[in-house]
Amino acid sequence: MGRQIHVPGALVAALLLAAAAGCSDPGTPGGGDPKPQPSASRAAPPAGAPAAGDVLPGMVTTAVARGQLAELKVAPVGTMAGYSRAKFTHWAEQGNKCDTRETVLKRDGTEVTQDGECRAVSGTWTSLYDGVVVNDASKMDIDHIVPLAEGWRSGASGWDAARRKAFANDLTHPQLLAVSASSNRSKGDQSPDLWQPPDRSSWCQYGRAWTTVKSTYGLTVTEPEKKMLTTMLDTCTS
């Protein structure tokens, strides 16, 4: 019978603890299976991502728009003294012989073809405001969601020329949209309390776009305008 080796109890306990630790995931406190990580394809959309179906760039969710609206400064309608459309340089050159108008026509249409001067010569456009389908670019207007005159009345009168030019040619935020000429001219320079898109299904997008542009540029709203924007946001389903 071989000689027995006596191992102290404290050492046995230490060895058992080390073995247990070796079976645990070092990155998981207390051992056990690590929590599954979401795959890239299932990752949640970034905060403020536009809802499906939006046609404007830079759109935010309804919740974000409500927060923006709550933070807008409420003030009376400003004066039109000194206003001129010429103080808002447009349409600006965007490269490759294209100006802002032609860039938006290309962006908002389907199967749009352009000539050597970047002019749209064919394509199809669906006007968000009234649902009218147009196949002739000359019958489309590029609408400033927040009109230049409305911008002037709510804060742009104090801007420099560079900021006014940026506002009039903004391709990043939801400020420019190709719509039927008739709907754009019906709107004019009116705020949402005075004019609403005739197609009520567009109110959610219109309200969010208007609110985001005013928030982006630090423009004011009137009480009736804010109330109507709230009504428009209430038409959103999410």
Image: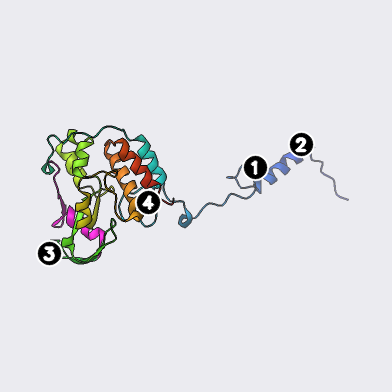
Q: Which residue is mark 2?
A: 10
Position of residue 63 measured from the top left corner of the image (x, y, whole percent): 42, 44
Q: Is residue 8 visible?
A: no
| Residue 220 visible, this angle | yes
* Marks 4 and 1, the one that precedes in the sequence: 1
Asked whether the beta carbons under mark 4 and mark 2 sit within 8 Å of each other, the answer is no
**Label 2 SS:** helix
Give the left or right position of residue 224, taking residue 120 as reference: right
**On screen, residue 127 above or below 238:** below
Closer to the chain start, of discs 2 and 1, is: 2
Q: Position of residue 16 (x, y in %)?
A: 73, 43
Kindly state the secondary structure of the residue where label 1 is placed. Answer: loop
Q: Which disc, if any, is residue 116?
A: 3
**Hey, what amino acid is under mark 4?**
Pro
Q: Residue 50 got which mark? A: 4
> Which numbered disc, 4 or 2, marks the residue that appears first in the sequence?
2
Q: Label for residue 30?
A: 1
Q: CA distance from mark 2 to mark 1?
A: 22 Å
Q: Residues within 10 Å of mark 4 (few under 14, many from 20)?
A: some
Observer-nearest residue: 55 or 234? 234
- Kind of residue at badge 3: Gly
- Amino acid type for the residue under numbered disc 1: Gly
Q: Point out the tag, 3 or 2, that comes first from the N-terminus.
A: 2
Counting the numbered discs, the total is: 4
Residues drawn in magenta: 87-110
- The residue at the point 13 percent across, 34 percent down is 81
